Amino acid sequence: MSQTNWEADKMLDVYIHDYLVKRDLKASAQAFQAEGKVSSDPVAIDAPGGFLFEWWSVFWDIFIARTNEKHSEVAASYIEVG
């Protein structure tokens, strides 16, 4: 595994932990942090619902826009530009 992939894995772990904490899933967050040896350093992108939630929301909106006629105007405009 390359250094870049290892760093990506660790960053994903940090954002999973951040998501669990922001969803108030304390026991799950603690278990995940302990088992995965996840850093307790603050995340670089501190979104209110967690970066993963924000990312997922954007991804899902765009995915639905591409696969379904019922979608948001924002997603439709992104698809038109992209």
Image: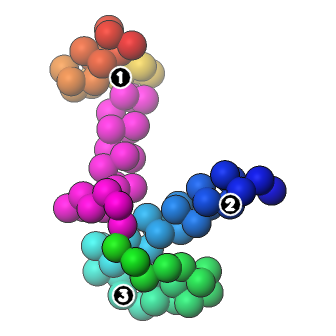
Is 13 left or right of 69, judged from the image as shown?
right
Q: Secondary structure at mark 3?
A: helix
Taking depth in this image into account, of 62 and 6 the one nearest to the observer is 6
Nearer to the camera, 31 or 9: 9
Please, what is the three-letter code of the amino acid marked with disc 3?
Lys
Q: Residue at x 77, y 53 (%)?
A: 2
Going from N to C along the chain, the mark reached first, 1 or 3, is 3
* Residue at image location 38% in from the left, 38% down from the top: 60
Magenta-span inclusion, residue 54: yes
C-alpha gap between disc 1 and disc 3: 34 Å
For discs 3 and 2, the disc positioned in front in the rendered view: 2
Q: Which residue type does callout 1 highlight?
A: Ala
- State which quarter of the image contains the N terminus: bottom right
- Of the image marks 2 and 1, the number of the one nearer the N terminus: 2
Per the rendering, the mark at residue 6 is 2
Q: Amino acid at mark 2?
A: Trp
Image quadrant where residue 9 sits? bottom right
Per the image, label 1 sits on a secondary structure element best described as: helix
Q: Which residue is mark 1?
A: 65
Note whether 27 is above or below 53 in the view shown.
below
* Residue found farthest to the right: 1
Residue reaching furthest front? 3
Mark 2: secondary structure: helix
User: Which contiguous range is marked in magenta?
Assistant: 43-64
Please give the name of the residue rendered at 31% of the width and 57% of the height, measured from the top-left corner. Answer: 45
| Labels 2 & 1 near each other (Cβ < 8 A) | no
Give yes or no for residue 19 being in the magenta stretch: no
Q: Which residue was labeled with disc 3?
A: 26
User: Residue 3 at x, y = what percent?
Assistant: 71, 57
